[in-house]
Image (spheres, rainbow, N blue to C red):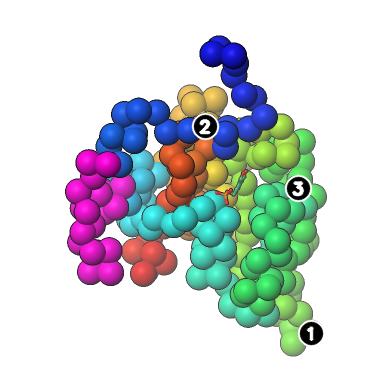
Amino acid sequence: MKHLIDLRSDTVTLPPEAMRRAMHEAALGDDVYGEDPTVNALQEKAAAMLGKQAGLLVTSGTQGNLVSLLSQAARGDQVLIGRQSHIFKYEAGAASVLGGLCLEPLTNEEDGAFRAEDIEAAINPPNVHFAPTRLLAIENTHNLAGGAPIDATTTMRMAKAARAHGLKVHLDGARLFNASVALGVDAAALAEPVDSVSVCLSKGLACPVGSVVVGDADFID
Ligand SMILES: Cc1ncc(COP(=O)(O)O)c(C=O)c1O
């Protein structure tokens, strides 16, 4: 039993002794006043690693995705999302329930990416009958595509198709650092063409809880 490796999910990982010690000994401060040095250091480190201005510690990947969508799209706006994405399938429709967002599912390719033509075809023209399309959400690695990593060129192609129509782009990067290792590229290069990224700490990294959202300073505010 000592050598049993549980491969059901990377979420089963538990904090090792050194992490438990670091938690116990962490310097604390008031987070409302931005005075928690440990949280500040974590947020700054995550932002730097992903090439963004600022970061925000949240409780989970689901919360990270939710605050990212709700900050960048308003009630009645349309969000383009993978039919096989975690946000669409496994987050209880929260963006619609809590934010009034209209989720428009797109077909995922084998690696979880979208064809630029499919993104463009799903964008509503400005017309009073249609929900205004504001945001594209992508996922890397893509969980239901067997954990496939999506490379920087493909990410750029999807983001360009969205940006050409004034859309923002959110990346559910729950396992973005896995993609970075698999592709041998910096995580910042995979995050470069998007506005917001959510990364999970509670999966391969073995933290008991937590995710970090990064983006520009206005978005994080
Ligand atoms: C791709 C992806 N995004 C988001 C999440 C949600 O993370 P959490 O369970 O921390 O809410 C998961 C969880 O497994 C995931 O696989």
Q: Nearer the viewer, mark 3 or mark 1?
A: 3
Q: Secondary structure at mark 3?
A: loop
| Residue at far bottom of view | 128
Residue occupying the point 57% across, 63% down: 66
Q: Nearer the viewer, residue 117 or 188?
A: 188
Name the residue carrying label 3.
84
| Distance between the alpha carbons at the discs numbered 3 and 1 | 27 Å
Q: Secondary structure at mark 2?
A: loop
Q: Position of residue 213 (x, y in %)?
A: 44, 55
Q: Nearer the viewer, mark 3 or mark 2?
A: 2
Q: Is residue 50 magenta?
A: no
Whether residue 89 can be seen here: yes
Amino acid, disc 1? His
| Distance between the alpha carbons at the discs numbered 3 and 2 | 24 Å
Q: Is residue 37 magenta?
A: yes
Q: Secondary structure at mark 1?
A: loop
